[in-house]
Amino acid sequence: MDRFDGMRAFVRVVESGSFTRAADNLGWSRTTVTQLVQQLEARLQLKLLHRTTRRVNVTNDGAVYYERVVRLLAELDDIEGNLPGAPTVPRGLLRVDVPSPLANIILVPALPGFYARYPDIQLDMGASDRKVDLIGDNVDCVVRGGSMKDEGLVARHVGDLPLGVYAAPAYLAQAGTPLHPEELRDPRQRIVRYRWDKDLPYTLRRGRETVKISARYALAIDDGNAYLTAGLAGLGVLWLPHYMAEKHLETGALVPLFTGWQIEPIAMHVAYPPNRYVSKQLRVFIDWVVELMAVHAPRQQAPGPLA
């Protein structure tokens, strides 16, 4: 048995909770992963994993071993990667999940530049606004907006998305154009609500004046692209990051509201499990996202504590 292959197999099984998912992640067969872990346990004379028909859980000894092995593999990766004759281009599979509008408008259009630098990285990208279980879904990292309150993740603050308030001309023709945020309380007015947004009511500021808006909504939706489409269809007022609204402002499909007011930007984070083996491909992907955010959503505030 190659001792390090056994360690890598064990680490991926712990992180994914499944021999099958670990095998998919490593590009090996399930039989190979199973045999490597069994041989590792035999050599150590310790039971590292509890196996059931539904889930694989780490034992107490396995948890201690995992913590040490993750650090060892990371150090080994650094050593091998920094040798004078070692290949400098990261390679391998990386699983990420990003918000669907960010993927469509910013990340995917920029991927040709990413692959020009890192042609040997294979990306499995989930473009969704769902809440991802990084361990259970075997995802290496997620890009998410808003506060990061999950204490089980490491979160790197990578940018701040400026926000604005917008509506379609058809909606304004029907409901009237509100000139002050308080006018959204009028029964004729309505908003489109993003279901995952925990920041409602929104706070708008102008000088010393502060207004919190909690208008009634006609539609609550959990996908960013569909949320934008609802606003374009005239279903209500939208709170949007500037990058989502820009094209539609140019065509007149959206009209900005309350332009003299300010809204706190959405803090963007890249998050990953704290004990996960941080591969080269994950490191360069995070650095690439940081570069993109510096262009499209530069940081406007000091980062909070890691979540």
Image (cartoon, helix red, strand yellow):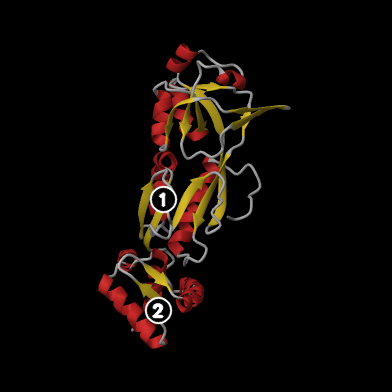
In this rendering, position of residue 25 left or right of residue 303: left
Residue 9 on image: x %, y %: 37, 73
Q: Which mark is residue 97?
A: 1
Residue beneath the point at 63% across and 42% down = 300
Tell me the quarter of the picture where residue 305 sits: bottom right
Vertical relation: 61 (above or below) 118? below
- In the picture, the quarter occupied by the N terminus is bottom left
Q: Which residue is mark 2?
A: 4
Q: Is residue 142 visible?
A: yes
Residue 289 on image: x %, y %: 49, 50
Residue 39 on image: x %, y %: 34, 83
Q: How far is mark 2 from mark 1, CA to CA? A: 28 Å
Q: Amino acid at mark 1?
A: Asp
Q: Residue furthest right?
A: 208
Tell me the quarter of the picture where residue 123 sits: bottom left
Q: Amino acid at mark 2?
A: Phe
Q: Which mark is residue 26?
A: none
**Which type of secondary structure does the marked residue at label 1 adopt?**
strand
